[in-house]
Amino acid sequence: MLKTYQKLRFNKIYLIKHISPYSNQPVPKEKTDEHYEQQLKEFQKISNIQQKVKTKKPQKPPFVKNLFLGIFDTDILTYPELKNEELDNLNKIVQQAQTVLEKPEVKECKQISRQFLKKLGAGQILGQQASQLMGGRELNAMETCRLTEAISEIDLKNVIVNNEKLGIQLLVKFGSDHLKRKYLQKLIDGDSLSAFCVVEPLPTNLDIFKKTAMPTSGGKTWILNGEKKMVLNGSDADIYIVFANTNHLIKDEVREQKFTAFVVERDFGGVTSSRHKTLDNNLELSDVVFENTPIPAENIIGNEGQGDTILSGIYPEYRLSTGPVCSSLVKKLINRMTQHYINVSKEPHLLYETDAVRMKLGELTASLYAIESMVYLTAGLIDEYENQDTELETAIVKVFASEQALLSTTSCINFLGPEATLDSHWCSKLHTEALSQVALNDHNDNLKILIALFGMRHVGQETNDLIRKLRNPFFYSTFVLKRMWTHRRHFDDNPKLNLYLHHYLHPSSINASNRLEYCVLRLQHATETLLSRYGQEVINKHADLTRLAECIMDIYAMTACISRASRSYCIGLQSAEYEMALASAIAMSATERVKANLLKVIEGPYMTNDENYRVITQRLFDFKKYYPTHPLTRNF
């Protein structure tokens, strides 16, 4: 490499020295040192490329969706892992990244700047899954999650993760060669920052995307108009990924509506932004307005009308990234709580030996263990199988991780007392960060309903004939009677455990695996009961759908924790016996929640509070306010 640079320098000097002073030829333009430095940089980039052979197994049926059918893929109980060489390379990458991230000007930076981004670009922290030829790392999903954990230690982690997952990675997967050459390299090097624009103001119907882009008469330019709300990095970005409706005139003023993604530069004109003040000072949200903004036709991402495909292709990996961010947050919480009680404990009365403290820290540890286990199980599914359907798994990770982080910080504030409510207190800061993870881009309550609906749709496609017979018992009386007999144990809440999951795990986990098996079988029964009761109207039963989603989240958490603990015990990892205790504790508490939720689903709306709440709320909207009279009111 040094010889190459010396040769370039020699050619430059030789060319300058050997020009005749009497020559009539024009003096050649001298190449600057920056030119040769750029060539050297490109040479170094090429010489550092490592060949990565990625062989994946054929796609298999979706795991979580099949749980609604009572089908459990036992291959999942073999917890994923990296090979020794891959793990060594990953550790080196993480160490290199931590060297950059631990610098005070990076770790404690409060305001995004080009200098900050350039340092991340120089440390190859940006472009985690981009081509090595462009300065990326070409990491797989598990490696990306590990690097995201390291990034989560800095204050501006949300800025980086959003830029990486919804900007860089979107262009890596769906961008044309032109867009990659024009924008991707700038984002990877830290010369530009991206913002993801999809949320719009106050939707009043299902057609929530009111932002429109219309082509000009020549078709070479599109004109964008509209507003996007709550855009992360919206005021600092110079590149926007914008989703908009594109209407085409078909015939006789009939328009075909399509959903399309564009790359929009701030310099295109007509782009204004207004910054919001948020609880989290490290979270910058803005409203971005586009007014007659011209966009070249080549800046369409993919093809016109592929916006839905792009969103469904990019959101799963973004949702998965919430897991490492939240696991890092809960880990900080546990470490600070542990140190706090060690510091305040004095002989002979040690606070950290009391049941109250041990119970609280035990719950926090179990939450963190579950988050970590789910993140890397899901990442392993993505890495191991070709085009694996993990849309439910990634959504579950996002909801579970963010909710557990918020519950953990809330309980710690309650446990520590009034001082923890101060803005300057470390627990209050962590609580604010956790709150932002719950509502950022995806709303957890909406995601829960979507998780359940996608599962129900899968069940409906697979068991359409069965549900039709269950909904028409008078026409299929013999079938229904036989089914009532074969499923009689479900009416006693005692299903036969015939999945034999403990055969695929360490014998020490038999109690936890039996609890998992019970939950899977009860989930299948509750799903069939719900579909046979409501049919297609199930899409409007949001209370029951939420309960189903919470059950499937608990079941997935149990699966991840039990398989991870079994692997740790089998290969003799440090603290493996305590991992088994963690898996057992998680399985026990999750089973209690699943049992309670599914019992409400199976018994129906009149055995729960659902109908009461519907009546109460109807009157609330009739009066448009809280309607019960004051408790001191009299009428005589």
Image (cartoon, grey):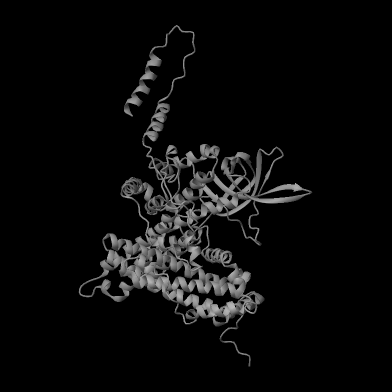
Counting from the top left corner in percent of width and height, residue 64 is at: 48, 63
Image mark count: 0
Q: Let me know if residue 418 appears in the view.
A: no
Image quadrant in which the C terminus is located: bottom right
Image quadrant in which the N terminus is located: top left
Foreground pick, 602 / 575? 602
Foreground pick, 342 / 86? 86
Q: Is residue 15 above or below residue 623?
A: above
Q: In this view, which residue lies farthest toward the top? A: 22
* Residue at the image point whose x is 46% and y is 72% from the top: 521
* Residue at the image point whose x is 63% and y is 90% from the top: 635
* Residue at the image point whose x is 65% and y is 39% from the top: 221
Looking at the image, residue 221 sits to the left or right of residue 565; the answer is right
Residue 335, located in which quarter of the rendered image? bottom left
Counting from the top left corner in percent of width and height, residue 420 is at: 38, 67
Q: In this view, which residue lies farthest toward the front? A: 478
* Residue at the image point whose x is 49% and y is 75% from the top: 597
Foreground pick, 265 / 576? 576
Counting from the top left corner in percent of width and height, residue 517 is at: 42, 71
Foreground pick, 196 / 384? 384
Q: In this view, which residue lies farthest toward the left? A: 348
Q: Let me know if residue 122 appears in the view.
A: yes
Counting from the top left corner in percent of width and height, residue 163 is at: 48, 48
Q: In this view, which residue lies farthest toward the right? A: 252
